[in-house]
Image (cartoon, rainbow, N blue to C red):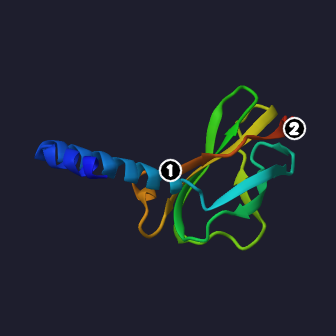
């Protein structure tokens, strides 16, 4: 122990500042790695109804597991990817200071654009969360992209 103190005393002021800055960076990085848990997890997603035509609504329903009881702000985008691989943003939502839902599921509805290509399509949701209070997530949000959910777009009837 005395040798560590003796080394510390012989280190110059600039070196002490560098050691202190390094310790601060390590502490902040450790805190950031702890603070990367989103407010909840979504699993077992499904699209209802599973077969639709352009212009009709679909509902994405997910099983919800709360991971932290904290209020948060979120920005979510929802996209539909049609059979030609065309990405269409169908919804964007911002919400401030909300709590995780009390239910064990969550459902969000969107309308399918009229001009989509028929065939196998996918629904994709991406959300970024900023935990309220003292949190580095205000600078570095927790962003989560959910797995794509498949559904079918039927051809429009001939008129």
Residue shown at the point (12%, 43%) measured from the top left = 12
Quadrant location, the C terminus:
top right
- Contact (Cβ within 8 Å) of mark 2 with mark 1: no
- In the image, 147 versus 4, the foreground residue is 4
Q: Is residue 86 above or below residue 22?
A: above
Viewer-side residue, 13 vs 152: 13
The residue under label 2 is 157
- Secondary structure type for disc 2: loop
Marked residue nearer the N-terminal end (2 or 1): 1
Q: Secondary structure at mark 1?
A: helix
Question: Residue 61: image x %, image y %?
Answer: 79, 56
Tag 1 residue: 33
Q: Position of residue 141 (x, y in %)?
A: 48, 52
| Left or right of residue 53, residue 20 in this image | left
Q: Is residue 6 visible?
A: yes
Q: Nearer the viewer, residue 16 or 103?
A: 16
Name the spot of residue 17 as percent of width and height, x first.
Answer: 19, 48
């Amino acid at each position: 122990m005395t040798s560590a103190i003796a080394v510390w005393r012989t280190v110059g002021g600039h070196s002490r500042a560098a050691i202190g800055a390094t310790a601060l960076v390590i502490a902040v990085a450790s805190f950031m790695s702890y603070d990367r848990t989103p407010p909840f997890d979504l699993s077992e997603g499904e699209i209802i109804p599973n077969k639709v035509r352009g212009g009709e609504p679909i509902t994405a329903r997910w099983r919800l597991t709360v991971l932290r009881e904290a209020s948060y702000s979120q920005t979510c985008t929802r996209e539909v990817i049609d059979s030609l691989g065309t990405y269409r943003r169908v919804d964007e939502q911002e919400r401030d200071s909300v709590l995780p839902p009390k239910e064990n599921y969550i459902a969000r509805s969107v309308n399918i654009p009229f001009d989509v290509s028929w065939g196998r399509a996918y629904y994709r949701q991406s959300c970024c969360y900023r935990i309220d209070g003292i949190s580095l997530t205000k600078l570095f949000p927790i962003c989560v992209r959910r797995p794509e959910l498949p559904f079918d777009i039927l051809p429009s009837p001939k008129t």
